[in-house]
Amino acid sequence: MFNKILIANRGEIAIRIMRACRELGIKTVAVYSEADRNAQHFQLADEAVFIGDAAPKESYLNMDVLIRAALDSKADAIHPGYGFLSENASFAAAVESAHLAFIGPSADSIRAMGDKAESKILMKKAGVPTVPGFEGLESDDDFKKAAKEVGYPVLVKAAAGGGGKGMRVVNEENELKEAIELARREALNAFGDSRLLIEKYLAEAHHIEIQVFGDKHGNLVHLFERECSVQRRHQKIIEESPSPLLTPELREQMGKAAVNAAKAVGYYNAGTVEFILDPKLATLNLQPFYFLEMNTRLQVEHPVTELVTGLDLVHWQIRIAAGEKFPFTQSDLHQHGHAIECRIYAEDPATGFLPSTGKLLQFIQPEGPGVRVDSGFATGDDVTHFYDPLLAKLIVHAGNREDAIKRMKTALNDFIVHGVVTNIDYMRAVLETDDFKQGKVSTRWVESQFGEWSSAQPELHALIAAALADVVFVSGKARPAVSNETDPFNPWKQTGNYRN
């Protein structure tokens, strides 16, 4: 087992990995940028190394600086978390070349699945169903011909990268040229690669992903599905398991397809194979699901799988990277109960999900049976514009879906954030809809059915609480000492400003 691991990330995922390392008796090294000098992950690690300016390319995306930090701190391995360099094959290879362990799949697996065009060709050879479409397109005429053959609406998407960048839905031919230009420009800026492909766009599709896990000894299994259809701008905001749509037969088919996809690239460690599913096709006995892509890393929504399987995925990532065998066969694994995750963002749904920045005057997390919060923030922290506006992941687990929804609504009510605008009210409103309760939410549902939402005016007690939080925070920053109190347990000694 490793003695020390450098975590090449920040925020909640860095803290999540630190927790797993502590449980395994492994020391941790945090890295931090200029903007993260007071961040929670910096404070909670055993050691911390400064890696540069706030801009990601100067810090969390700087491969040389990260590897040097690991070597100087005498770490044995690097865990990339998710985002940043987690799916960068060159980084994985550079880590291995520096005689450090990369806690993830091989560079070859990342490279094979990182290119959407090449991975689709690979999946076709492996017998995994893929979305009808075309790769290797060059001219506008090529795109027009391909779109006509596939049939509108189509999806123009970047061949490299992910996260919803470089993607445009095209409903008719006169929209195609502009969509290609916009997608190409965005793909080049985000991934340094302007190549595009075109696919059939399934308007009422659901996004189903299958968690896979393998070791370096040839064992590979799936850990069931996550339903991720509640999305805004192609970004997931609510995930759950089991999916309310899947029958046992369909679950088995998709699980086998995911394992076959992973085997095709010699995969080990944690990964996720993403599919789109059209439930209408299933009722017609037609092929109902298609391969989208594979995420060669730990997913943001991995806690959902942890709660329904009882497995600690980060523990097993580390243990597999250290050479251990994954001791479970497919028949050993089962889903228990129902889990839901809501991503709590500092953003305003009423203004097109614009990010919100500022100081967290109050950040009170919900607690209780079956409630879990993964977060990288605390009261007094700054939410900046440099990084993703994710504040926390709120996850609940209950015996069935109906009870899980009730538990999540209660937890959302108990989540108090003052200082920035959040999507908490929006999450609660989604859970209240009949479509969500009945599991009928497709990937376009937010845009087409829930786009005009606006938050209610805050009630008087909420405004008072926010004002008090501001006063308490500001006064607490300059609280004078009460030196004339001799009793250290006297409560007045702890309230110097009020006494003063």
Image: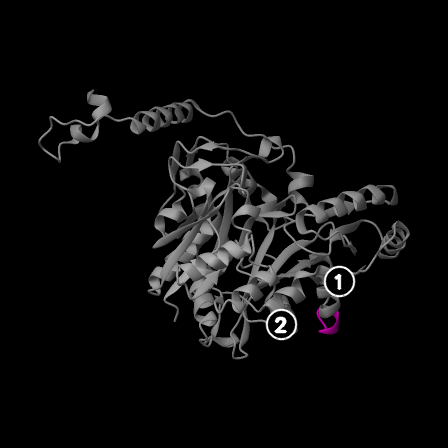
Q: Secondary structure at mark 2?
A: helix
Find the distance from the CA under tag 1 to the CA under tag 2.
21 Å
- Viewer-nearest of labels 1 and 2? 2
**Where, quadrant-wise, is the N terminus in this rendering?**
bottom left
- In the foreground, 285 or 179: 179
Q: Secondary structure at mark 1?
A: loop
Inspect the magenta stretch and tell me whether residue 257 lies in it.
no
Residue 203: image location, x then y, percent: 74, 49
* Picture residue at 61% right of the left edge, 33% below the top: 453
Per the picture, the main secondary structure of the magenta-coloured stretch is loop
Query: Magenta span covers which residues?
Result: 124-128
| Coordinates of residue 264 in the picture (x, y in percent) | 66, 73
Q: Quadrant of residue 482?
A: top left
**Left or right of residue 286, residue 69 in this image:** left
Residue ID for mark 1: 284
* Amino acid type, mark 1: Leu
Q: Amino acid at mark 2?
A: Lys
Magenta span includes 125: yes
Residue 256 is tagged as: 2
Q: Residue at position x 54%, y 59% from top?
A: 242
